[in-house]
Amino acid sequence: AREIVESELRDHTQGGWLDYPAAARLLGAYGIRVAEAVPVGGREAACAAAARLGPPVALKATGPDLVHKSDVGGVRVNLDGVEEVGRAYQEMADRLGTAMTGALVQRMAADGVEMIVGGVAHETFGPLVMAGMGGVTAELLADRAFRVPPISDADAGRMLGELRCEPLLRGYRGRPVVNTEELRAQIAGVGRLMDDIPEVAELDLNPVIVTPAGAVAVDVRVRLA
Ligand code: ADP
Ligand code: MG
């Protein structure tokens, strides 16, 4: 983890957002599973990546100023074949123009509950970890719990218990009960990461998709300072 952070800080002395592969490696060092994805620079490469990962895949536009990708139609999910990926890439590139410098071709996660896990290096309080309801409505609903690390597995469970969306994890209205063990481990892992690596100014996993099998982050942002 230190090596990743130091090499990134060397390359971008101002700090800044890690690219997806670097963020995934850093998070992986703390046991946080991130959906496999391949960064691509063009339509042909997107098709090749989709063939390698095996459809269905998600396609996400990338670019220095693309933050909320779905707001600008920069996310397509469940693309079923290589040709479909090629067409979707072309359509995004035509529409987004120079804002889109490439894309991420990503393995699809199974259906599940979308949660958010975040960390921030607070000026006064130091590292803080957040867990809450995730997805594109996360900001709107702001259903969140905060803790100062270290965070034990039991602490992570209590954070989830404080959320209004917690019943969604227990099989709300006939939906399957999801397995929160890996989610709790991810919350604790973010706590360790924030404690270990003061260069991480903020990080955001939104969403982490929690299924009966476990939890996988499909959108990750890590900013170094
Ligand atoms: P952004 O937050 O920038 O709009 P995301 O990468 O979070 O973009 O994608 C938006 C939504 O698309 C997610 O909340 C999720 O519902 C869905 N999604 C994205 N990637 C995947 C994936 N790999 N598997 C399943 N669903 C996905
Ligand atoms: Mg997101």
Image: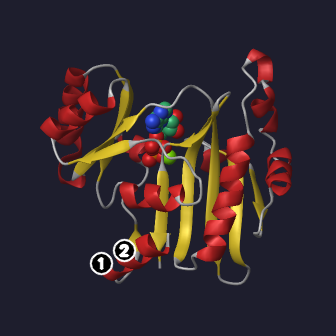
- Check whether the beta carbons of the residues at disc 1 and disc 2 lie within 8 A of each other: yes
Q: Is residue 188 visible?
A: yes
Helix, strand or loop under label 1: helix
Q: State the residue in front, 5 or 162.
A: 5
- Please identify the quarter of the rendering in which residue 190 is found: bottom right
Q: How many neighbours does mark 1 have within 10 angstroms: few (below 14), some (14-19), or many (20 or more)?
A: few
**Residue 83: image location, x then y, percent:** 19, 22
Report which residue position mark 2 lands on: 8
Query: Between marks 1 and 2, how big is the CA–CA gap?
Result: 5 Å
Q: How many neighbours does mark 2 have within 10 angstroms: few (below 14), some (14-19), or many (20 or more)?
A: some
Residue 70: mark in rendering: none
Q: Is residue 142 visible?
A: no
Q: Is residue 21 left or right of residue 44?
A: right
Q: Is residue 135 left or right of residue 143?
A: left
Helix, strand or loop under label 2: helix
Q: Is mark 2 within 8 Å of ligand 1?
A: no
Give the amino acid type for the residue marked by disc 2 in the picture: Glu
Report which residue position mark 1 lands on: 11
**Residue 36: image location, x then y, percent:** 41, 42
> In the image, what residue occupies the spot 33% across and 19% down?
80
Give the amino acid type for the residue marked by disc 1 in the picture: Asp
Q: Is residue 189 left or right of residue 53?
A: right
